[in-house]
Image (cartoon, rainbow, N blue to C red):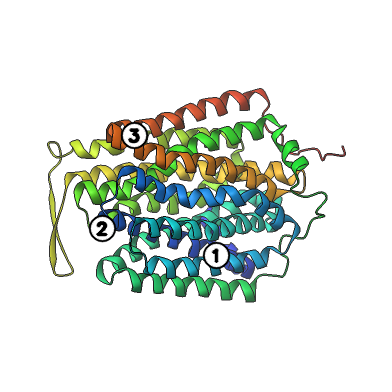
């Protein structure tokens, strides 16, 4: 076992890190399982591309509305309470999904799920950033996100199997049990007020956000997140739906496609996080990851043209013989490339935002800006791509998503080169 791997695994001797990782595990597993379920709902309710886009937009819209006030509240109140509340909201969302009867119901429950997921992501990331030592923040954040990536992989594998074998209700019961267990760990293992309460007059106010946005590196990161969020969330929303509705793949094989990206992301993210600590130049990791993601995105629509190039493959599972269409291999490969891209980009991106926020004692505020930019892209991206798909073609839809990623990466590179981020940031009083 390598020194880097041992170093990452040693974090699990820390009970608080285990508790925080439990929230990431529950959040990501639920997110991945529900994405497969959305593909089934799209098929069952025979939805249009625009409505399918709303499955993603509804999830993001509520997050966009709450993320800035939520960031202030996490900075100024007990983050442990927010983690417990987010887990409880997710359980309520699972109950709602078990009883949906049409596409409108799905959209409404996605709003509830979005609120729970936003609380868990922001509070969990902020606490990990606050508790981690400064010289190993990349390792903490990388390993924390590696847990989320592994959980997402488990959500694909376990969630896909449960949906295939037992249907919606039992699957949501399992997700509820996992989420409740995460809540128990937070309650008993995590210290009270883990992030430390800031003075409401000083933390996460409008002036703090303006100060952060006054820095060129922060503006570069925000613009990048906006364009990247547009492209990535279009992929996340529509790839499972494309596999189900265009090629008739059952939940197991939709899950297998998603697992390709989750596996590469799980294996690489913690290691890359450690490399960013040692090598520096984190913005270059962001650029490399984004351009790699654009390549994977552009490959997706070629799945429909794979029939004349790749052979079909028949597999027997659970007493049934299933034929894998050539499209499966194209989608699997594209998403595996996307997993590598996220491993390059994500630890560096999070560390850059944490470093900026730390200089003003407002890590949650900085992460809020990161999330707001993402949510703007996530709100617009899925719906826009769905409309383009309805009006033009799958190629136009995914090429547009890839193009926005490349454009935002170019703007980020140009702005970041003007005023690269220093290792320490002056406080407002300096």
Residue drawn where x is 46% and y is 55% of the image: 149
Regarding mark 2 in the picture, which secondary structure is present there?
Answer: helix
How far apart are the alpha carbons under marks 2 and 1? 31 Å
- Whether residue 290 appears in this view of the structure is yes
Regarding mark 1 in the picture, which secondary structure is present there?
Answer: helix
- Whether residue 2 appears in this view of the structure is no
| Residue 21 place in picture, x, y as percent | 55, 63
Tag 2–tag 1 contact (CB < 8 Å): no
Residue drawn where x is 69% and y is 43% of the image: 355
| Residue 233 place in picture, x, y as percent | 43, 44
Q: Earlier in the sequence, mark 2 or mark 1?
A: 1
Q: Disc number at residue 23?
A: 1
Q: Nearer the viewer, residue 152 or 266?
A: 152
Work out which quarter of the rendered image holds the C terminus and state it.
Answer: top right
**Residue that label 2 marks:** 44
**Residue that label 3 marks:** 388
């Amino acid at each position: 076992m390598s020194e880097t791997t041992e170093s990452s695994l040693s974090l699990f001797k820390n009970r608080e890190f285990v508790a925080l990782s439990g929230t990431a595990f529950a959040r990501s597993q639920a997110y991945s399982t529900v994405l497969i379920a959305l593909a089934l709902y799209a098929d069952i309710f025979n939805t249009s591309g625009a409505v399918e886009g709303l499955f993603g937009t509804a999830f993001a819209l509520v997050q966009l509305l709450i993320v800035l006030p939520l960031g202030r509240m996490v900075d100024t109140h007990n983050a442990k309470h927010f983690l417990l509340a987010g887990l409880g909201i997710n359980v309520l969302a699972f109950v709602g999904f078990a009883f949906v009867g049409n596409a409108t119901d799905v959209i409404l429950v996605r709003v509830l799920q979005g609120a729970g997921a936003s609380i868990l992501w922001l509070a969990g990331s902020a606490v990990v950033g606050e508790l981690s030592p400064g010289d190993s923040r990349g390792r903490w954040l990388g390993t924390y996100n590696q847990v989320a990536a592994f959980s997402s992989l488990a959500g694909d594998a376990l969630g896909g199997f449960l949906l295939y074998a037992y249907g919606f209700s039992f699957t949501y019961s399992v997700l509820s049990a996992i989420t409740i267990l995460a809540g128990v760990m937070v309650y008993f293992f995590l210290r009270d007020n883990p992030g430390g309460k800031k003075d409401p007059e000083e933390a996460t106010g409008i002036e703090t956000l303006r100060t952060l946005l006054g820095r060129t590196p922060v503006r570069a990161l925000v613009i990048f997140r906006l364009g990247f969020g547009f492209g990535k969330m279009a992929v996340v929303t529509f790839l499972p739906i494309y596999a189900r509705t265009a090629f008739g793949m059952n939940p197991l094989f939709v899950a297998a496609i998603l697992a390709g990206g989750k596996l590469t992301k799980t294996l690489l993210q913690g290691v890359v996080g450690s490399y960013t600590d040692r090598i520096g130049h984190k913005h270059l990791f962001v650029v490399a990851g984004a351009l790699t993601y654009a390549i994977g995105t552009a490959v997706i629509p070629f799945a429909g043209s794979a029939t004349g190039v790749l052979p079909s493959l028949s597999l027997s599972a659970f007493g049934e013989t299933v034929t894998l269409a050539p499209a499966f291999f194209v989608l699997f490969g594209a998403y595996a490339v996307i997993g590598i891209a996220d491993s390059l980009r994500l630890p560096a991106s999070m560390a850059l935002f944490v470093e900026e926020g730390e200089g003003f004692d407002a890590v949650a505020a900085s992460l809020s800006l990161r999330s707001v930019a993402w949510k703007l892209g996530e709100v617009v991206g899925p719906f826009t791509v769905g409309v383009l798909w309805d009006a033009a073609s799958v190629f136009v839809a995914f090429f547009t998503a890839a193009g926005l990623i490349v454009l935002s990466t170019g703007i980020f590179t140009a702005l970041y080169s003007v005023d690269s981020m220093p290792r320490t940031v002056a406080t407002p009083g300096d």
